[in-house]
Structures are given as structure tokens and as C-alpha cells.
Amino acid sequence: MVEARGVVKRFGGLTAVHSLDLTLREGEILGLIGPNGAGKTTLFNLLSGQFPPDAGQIRLLGREIQHLPSHRICRLGLARTFQVPRPFLAMTVFESVLVGAQFGRRVSGVSPSDTAEACLSLTRLGSRREAPVHFLNLAERKRLDLARALATRPRVLLVDEVAAGLNPTEVRETVGILREVHASGIGIIYVEHVMEAVLDISHRVHVLDHGATIAIGTPEEVTRNPAVIEAYLGRSAGS
Ligand SMILES: Nc1ncnc2c1ncn2[C@@H]1O[C@H](COP(=O)(O)OP(=O)(O)OP(=O)(O)O)[C@@H](O)[C@H]1O
């Protein structure tokens, strides 16, 4: 569904992403992990068109997108959530999701309002639909960010740290929602530091360190990989 080949991104003298290859297979949940500064968010910014790569090719559903702006990429079927959700605080929850539904891919016979309602229901925010966004707690804001991205009717969803800062019950609920999203046919690339969430739900895990791939495999394979233990799990276990 997504194919990145030889992707490079530099910020001045720093190469944040080094000639990276990444594949999201049809209907897959791909975990994307790595220590702080590994390049995960930069890669999401490249895939979603926040800025173009300095080199390399990115394909979404077979089409080259590396030079398209984010609104075009969104309409082609790729949506993302943000590490720090940025909803419109003055709007109600429903209005905020409706903006996503009006902005995204249109499907004949389904109104933006119906789409927004379905996304609120999926993210367990139906009872909060009339609440102003600034009334929501962190877990609800994270779910709202997910609802807004889903309202654009993506085929591929980039999820950035939706479990960060949540308690174990909220993490389980979020993982349950992501499973439902996946069951509806959406491919997911999931960046997460909360290991129990990302290892639980991912079919494969792609591990980055210093902007380069250090391992790709099943959750079991990558957690046994010495390079991963050294670069990431070892450091977080020790910290
Ligand atoms: N806009 C920017 N300008 C300059 N440097 C940047 C910019 N964005 C990211 N970087 C640098 O690129 C590298 C990769 O950062 P990135 O945020 O992609 O890592 P990450 O894996 O998402 O980290 P984290 O897990 O902490 O979110 C870091 O060294 C970071 O300081």
C-alpha cells in the first residue's frame, strides 16, 4: 500500500533519514519503532507530504507521491494522526470531525455528516459529540485526532503515539479501536513508544536508529534481535 525507496531527508548538516526503504503490505499493521530521534516522525512527515524528501521515491497505492502536497496525498487515501494532537479548540467534537469528513475522500451516497458520526462511534466519542474540544481529556483528544483522520476515509492511516501518556485501561481501549480500524480494511503504520501496544498489534515491526533501518520482522523476531536490544529496548529498559 506504501512503498518508500531510497528516501533521504536532511536538516542542514543532519541527515535525519538515510536512504530508507519501507513497505506497508496490503491490509497490514506495520509497527515503526526506534529510540528518540531515530527519524520516525520525520518519515511520517515525508509519507504524508508535510515536506518532500531530498532524494528517493514514495508510492501510495501504486502512485508516486513524493512531490505532492499533503492535501493531495490525503485525497489519494493517506491520513495521519499527530504526536501532539492539534484539534480546533473552539469547535465541538462533532464539528471537528466533520471538518475531516468534508476535507477527505468523498464516497457517493455517504454524507460527510454520516461519516463523522460513524467515526465518533468507532472512537467511543459519541456521547461527547456536543462537547467543546477543550473540555476533552488527553485520552479523548487522542481518540478525537484518530476520528478526524478516519473521517477523511483513508486507505492507509499513519498513527503517531496514540498510546503515549495513557493509563493501561486507556491503552487497551486504543489498541481495540486500532484493531477495528484494521478490520475495516485500512492499512496502518504505527509509531509508538508504548511497547505493549505496538508489539501486541503489529504484524511486522520496522526498527529505525539514527535514520536507518536496523531490523524488520515479526514482533518476536525484532525483540530477540541483538541490534534492537542494544539500540532501543536495552536503552529504554536501562532508563
Ligand atoms: N524540522 C526539523 N529541523 C531540524 N531537525 C529536525 C527537524 N525535525 C526533526 N529533526 C531532527 O531529525 C532527527 C529525527 O527526529 P524525529 O523527530 O523524526 O525522530 P523520532 O524518531 O520521531 O523521535 P521521537 O521518538 O523522540 O519522536 C532528530 O535528530 C531531530 O532533532
Image (cartoon, helix red, strand yellow):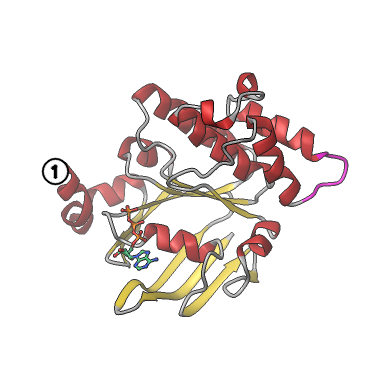
- Nearest the camera: 179 or 150? 150
> Label 1's element?
loop
Image quarter of residue 208: bottom left
Total residue callouts: 1
The stretch in magenta equals 106-111
Tell me if the residue at label 1 has its CB under 8 Å from ligand 1: no
The residue sitting at the right extreme is 109
* Point 33% across, 35% down: residue: 196
Image quarter of residue 77: bottom right
> Is residue 107 found inside the magenta-colored segment of the image?
yes
Asked if residue 198 is positioned above or below residue 46 in the image, the reply reads: above
* Point 32% across, 75% down: residue: 15
Magenta-drawn stretch, dominant element (helix, strand or loop): loop
* Point 30% across, 54% down: residue: 34
Asked if residue 134 is positioned above or below residue 87 in the image, the reply reads: above
Q: Position of residue 6 (x, y in %)?
A: 44, 77
Q: Position of residue 55 (x, y in %)?
A: 46, 81
Q: In the shown orientation, is residue 214 left or right of residue 6?
A: left
Q: Position of residue 86 (x, y in %)?
A: 52, 45
Q: In the shown orientation, is residue 38 left or right of residue 170?
A: left
